[in-house]
Image: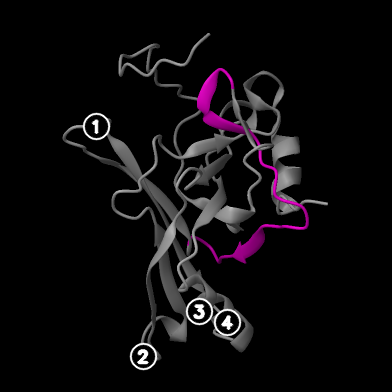
Amino acid sequence: MPIDCTGALTADILFDCENQGAGGIEQNVILINRDDIDRTLTTLDPTNNKVVSNITLKAGATGFKFTGVKQSNGKAYELVKKENAPDKWKHTFSGVIFSPTLANKTQANNMAQGSKYVVVVEQIFKGIGNKDAFEVLGYGSGLELMSMTNNSKENDNMIVFELSSSDGYEENTVAKTFLDGGVASGTYAASKTAFDNKFASE
């Protein structure tokens, strides 16, 4: 069945009392250099382009674990209205680097050099069969470092930063769901394994 892009509703929007929304994301997040994704092998589900059914990185590449504490890290997306084009979506990831060590400051400085990133998070809300657990931010255009601050008088000297879609390069859809294997056969277990392995390529 072709994916509808007319803007018309195609299904009911219902309240499922057993799968109510829940705020927050899990502590571990995976940051991926956008250029490390092998776009010839990474796939979207053929029935729903909001589902990434496989993330494959280029040979030798890996994602990088970013560890949070409690709800220090967060994700968001919001509609960006366009006057003469389809509307787009701004994706945002906000993070806190708790240990301002030389090694972590080096990676923070690397983020400021202009590269783009794709961020995979695990939500507290996981949906039916845990199939809504993982979301992908910046899958298309990637996210850029928009702000980074450190102040010894604030936040216990931690480094606070935000990655976001840049103006004019927003995403075509809301944050995509990552479900390894796709809508028909994907499972939380397979998705979690790929996530825990940082999507590393052999």
- Contact (Cβ within 8 Å) of mark 4 with mark 3: yes
Earlier residue among tags 1 and 2:
1
Q: Which residue is drawn at 54% across and 84% down?
A: 100
Who comes first in sequence, dot 1 or dot 4?
1
Q: State which tag comes first along the sequence, 4 or 2.
A: 4
Real-space CA distance between mark 2 and mark 3, rounded to the nearest whole angstrom: 21 Å
Query: Which circle's residue, 1 or 3, is located before the other in the chain?
Result: 1
Q: Residue 153 carries which label?
A: 2
For the residues carrying marks 1 and 4, which lies nearer the camera in this image?
1
Tag in front: 1 or 3: 1
Give how far apart the Cα atoms at labels 4 and 2 are: 22 Å
Where residue 168 appears, as percent x and y from the top left, is: 29, 49
Amino acid at circle 2: Lys
Seen as rendered, the residue at the extreme top is: 1
Q: Name the residue nearer the viewer: 82 or 101.
A: 82
Q: Nearer the viewer, residue 122 or 85?
A: 85
**What residue sits right under mark 1 in the picture?**
85
Q: Viewed as shown, does residue 166 lie left or right of 81?
A: right
Residue underneath mark 4: 106
* Residue type at numbered disc 1: Ala
Q: How far apart are marks 1 and 2 (CA)?
A: 45 Å
Query: Residue 71, how many percent across, how many down?
Result: 48, 60
For the residues labelled 1 and 3, the Cα–Cα distance comes to 35 Å
Q: Nearer the viewer, mark 1 or mark 2?
A: 1
